Image: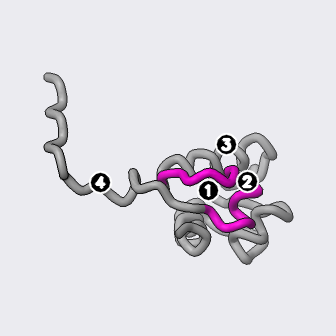
Amino acid sequence: MAEAAKPAGKKMDALQKPLTPSPELAAIVGKDMLPRGQVVSKVWEYIKKHDLQKPTDKRQIVADEKLKKVFGVDECSMFEMNKHLARHLK
């Protein structure tokens, strides 16, 4: 069954609202406004491209210099990542 179209004037959810990344986050995802979901996807692309997951526990992210500026810590779990990203989105 096809999904019903959203009624006109319906408020978009938080994942769809375009946000501006901070300069620190923009170094990873680009300076254009992006919805939160795309920011998270781009950060994961960056993490995987630069092999920044702990080999023994893929849920742990080991921050490189760029991610340290965003996360504020050397290491965080994938569950904590969104909390750190939220501080860098307006």
Marks 3 and 4: in contact by CB < 8 Å? no
Residue type indicated by callout 4: Met
Q: Which residue is mark 1?
A: 59
Badge 4 element: loop
Residue type indicated by callout 2: Ile
Magenta stretch encompasses residue 34: yes
Q: Earlier in the sequence, mark 4 or mark 3?
A: 4
What's drawn in magenta, residue-wise?
21-35
Q: How is the image coloured?
A: one colour
Q: Residue at x 62, y 62 (%)?
A: 21
Q: CA distance from mark 4 to mark 3?
A: 25 Å
Q: Which residue is mark 3?
A: 45
Marks 2 and 4: in contact by CB < 8 Å? no
Is 78 located above or below residue 72 in the figure? above
Q: Position of residue 24 (x, y in %)?
A: 74, 66
Marks 2 and 3: in contact by CB < 8 Å? no
Marks 3 and 1: in contact by CB < 8 Å? no
Q: CA distance from mark 3 to mark 2?
A: 10 Å
Q: Which residue is mark 2?
A: 28
Front position among marks 3 and 2: 2
Residues 59 and 51: in front is: 51
Badge 2 element: helix
Q: Residue at x 57, y 46 (%)?
A: 41
